[in-house]
Every structure is written in C-alpha cells, then in structure tokens.
C-alpha cells in the first residue's frame, strides 16, 4: 500500500510540473492581486499595513480556487479516476494524497514569496510571523474543503464559476480568523485563540473531508 500511495504522489507531482503554464497561473494571479491593491488604495505605509493581511489572504483564496479546478480533472478525462475508484487502495487515502500534493505545489511558492510581499506591504516582523502561521494552518483547510466541491462538479464542463460560488462562502470564517490573527499581531496582542480555532477547523476537515471527497467522486462517476 505504501508503494502504491507513493506512486500516486509521484505521478501527481510529475503531471503538475509538466504543465508549468497552468501551474504558474495561480501564482501569477496571486502576485497581480497583491501588487494591484497598493496602486488602488495608495502608497501610504500605514494604510498598506492595515490591510496587508486581508490582501494576501483574499489573493491566496482566489489563487487556490484557480488551481483547485484541475485537482481531479485530468484523472477524470483520461479514465484513471475510475481505475483509482475500483482499485483495492482505500480511496480516501488516495484523495488525501492528491490534496496534500495540491497544497504543496500551490502553497510552497506563496510561502517562498511571502517575505517579499510582507516587505512590499510594510508588514512588521510580528505580523509576518502571524501571516505565515495562518497560511500554514488555514490553507490546508481550503484545499480539503475545496476538494469536496471539485469532486462534486468533476463531471461538469467549465465548472470554475460554479465552484467559486459554492466554496467562497465556506471560506469566510477562515478569512475572518486569519485577518483577526494578523491584526492582533499588529497591535502586539496574543493571537493564540484565533490560531486554536483555525487549527480546530483544520483537524475537523482532516477527519471528515477525505471520506466525503471519496464518496463524492464515486457519485460523480455514476
């Protein structure tokens, strides 16, 4: 089973990096959104610092939604999704590996760019540390919950708009707690409560989402 799961992970990574143009689209979109906001609201350092957390988090959610649509699309198109469903491997483990791969491929570049973005938006060191923690705790939840919507709409053509309408309302609580964490860090206040809530949401998503995704994929194949 371990070899089979590793083979699935290796296959997903190789497919992702063969499609470099599609892989770069969410990252470029993220950078464009973050860099356009200062042009719209003005270059004032105080204003940029005030809204920096919200800017980065909104851009991260929207860029992840762009990448989510492809999570099961290629497997569905070439028939390998059906083979994965009928294979002896537990489907919930397979989809969990796919979601983790998606998170690594799309979030690690954002984390690498985050120091530059923090400097560009005049974030303090405390705010930057809070931003990194919220991204590490919150973005896996986006991938897990988003994968449920992708599994439900995998057989639909041009499902991107429908996917956004389904998922964006679900991410609002996460966005509120993430921006609240960064605001607390800006005022040098403790933010353990917000991180605890985000961690609880992540643990709940880890416990429930893989089974729901697996069931949704089976329903979509029928």
Image (cartoon, rainbow, N blue to C red):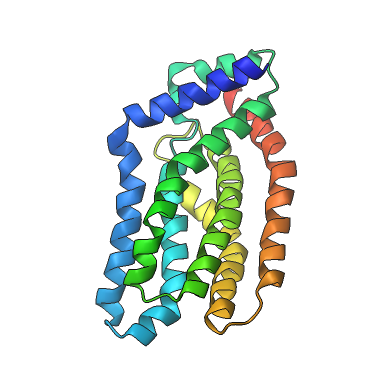
Quadrant location, the N terminus: top right
The picture places residue 93, in percent across and down from the top left corner, at 67, 28
* Residue 170 showing in the rendered view: yes
Q: Is 55 on the left-hand or right-hand side of 19?
A: right
Residue at the spot 43% in from the left edge and 22% down from the top edge: 77
Residue at the spot 31% in from the left edge and 43% down from the top edge: 24
Dividing the picture into quarters, in which one does residue 193 lie? bottom right
Front-most of residues 14 and 150: 14
The picture places residue 155, in percent across and down from the top left corner, at 50, 30
The correct choice, above or below, for 128 with respect to 94 in the image is below
Q: Is 28 on the left-hand or right-hand side of 216?
A: left
The correct choice, above or below, for 205 with respect to 19 in the image is below
Spot the residue most to the left: 39
Residue at the spot 32% in from the left edge and 30% down from the top edge: 19
* Residue 160 showing in the rendered view: no
Residue at the spot 50% in from the left edge and 73% down from the top edge: 127
Q: Is 99 on the left-hand or right-hand side of 58?
A: right
Exactly how many numbered labels are in the figure? 0
The picture places residue 152, in percent across and down from the top left corner, at 58, 37
Front-most of residues 160 and 48: 48
Quadrant location, the C terminus: top right
Spot the residue most to the front: 125
The correct choice, above or below, for 150 with respect to 81 in the image is below
The correct choice, above or below, for 33 with respect to 208 in the image is below
The picture places residue 25, in percent across and down from the top left corner, at 31, 45
């Amino acid at each position: 089973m371990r070899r089979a799961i590793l083979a699935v992970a290796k296959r997903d990574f190789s497919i992702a990096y063969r499609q470099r143009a599609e892989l770069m689209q969410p990252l470029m979109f993220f950078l464009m959104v973050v860099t356009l906001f200062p042009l719209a609201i003005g270059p004032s350092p105080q204003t940029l610092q005030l809204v920096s957390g919200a800017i980065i988090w909104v851009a991260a959610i929207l860029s992840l939604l762009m990448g989510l649509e492809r999570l099961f699309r290629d497997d569905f198109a070439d028939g390998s999704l059906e083979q994965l469903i009928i294979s002896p491997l537990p489907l919930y483990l397979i989809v969990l590996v796919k979601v983790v791969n998606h998170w690594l491929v799309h979030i690690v570049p954002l984390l690498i760019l985050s120091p530059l973005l923090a400097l560009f938006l005049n974030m303090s060191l405390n705010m930057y540390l809070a931003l990194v923690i919220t991204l590490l705790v919150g973005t896996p939840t986006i991938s897990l919950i988003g994968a449920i919507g992708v599994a439900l709409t995998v057989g639909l053509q041009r499902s991107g708009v429908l996917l956004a309408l389904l998922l964006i309302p679900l991410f609002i609580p996460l966005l509120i707690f993430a921006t609240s964490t960064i605001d607390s860090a800006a005022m040098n206040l403790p933010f353990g409560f917000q991180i605890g809530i985000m961690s609880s949401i992540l643990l709940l998503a880890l416990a429930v989402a893989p089974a729901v995704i697996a069931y949704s994929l089976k329903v979509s194949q029928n």
